[in-house]
Amino acid sequence: MSPTLVVLLAAAMYFYTSHIPDVNLRIQALSIAFSAACFIVASGLLQHREIHATPC
């Protein structure tokens, strides 16, 4: 899922840089992609909540 996120972010950055040069839209696209990446990482961590005991 994250390679798809990178491709979508690259397409959005290209579009908002070349066709519609708007800094606010670029910031929004980057923020949405970053929050989606954080959500993917957090959900992955919550799914694997195994506790690994280390010997002392």
Image (cartoon, helix red, strand yellow):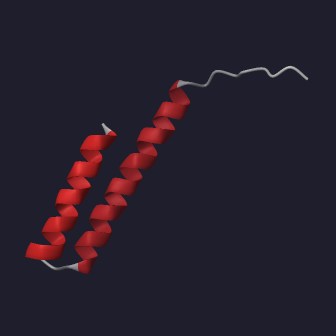
Closest to the observer: 10 or 51? Answer: 10
At 21% from the left edge and 52% from the top edge, which residue is drawn?
8
Give coordinates of residue 6: x percent, y percent.
Answer: 28, 50
- Above or below for 23 versus 46: below
Q: How many marks?
A: 0
Quadrant showing the C terminus: top right
| 34 relative to 18 in the view: left or right | right
Quadrant of residue 2 in the image?
top left
Q: Quadrant of the N terminus?
A: top left
Q: Residue at x 54, y 31 (%)?
A: 46
The quadrant in which residue 14 appears is bottom left
Say which residue appears at 26% left-offset and 79% top-offset. Answer: 23
The x and y percentages for residue 28 are 30, 67
Residue occupying image coordinates x 41% and y 40%: 40
Quarter of the rendering containing residue 45: top right
Residue 11 located left or right of residue 31: left
The image shows residue 4, relative to residue 21, as above or below, that is above
Percent from the top left, x then y, of residue 10? Answer: 23, 58
Q: Is residue 30 above or below residue 49?
A: below
Q: Nearer the viewer, residue 25 or 7?
A: 7
The residue lying furthest to the left in this view is 19
Asked whether, in this view, residue 20 is left or right of residue 9, the answer is left
Q: In the orientation shown, which residue stands out farthest toward the right?
A: 56
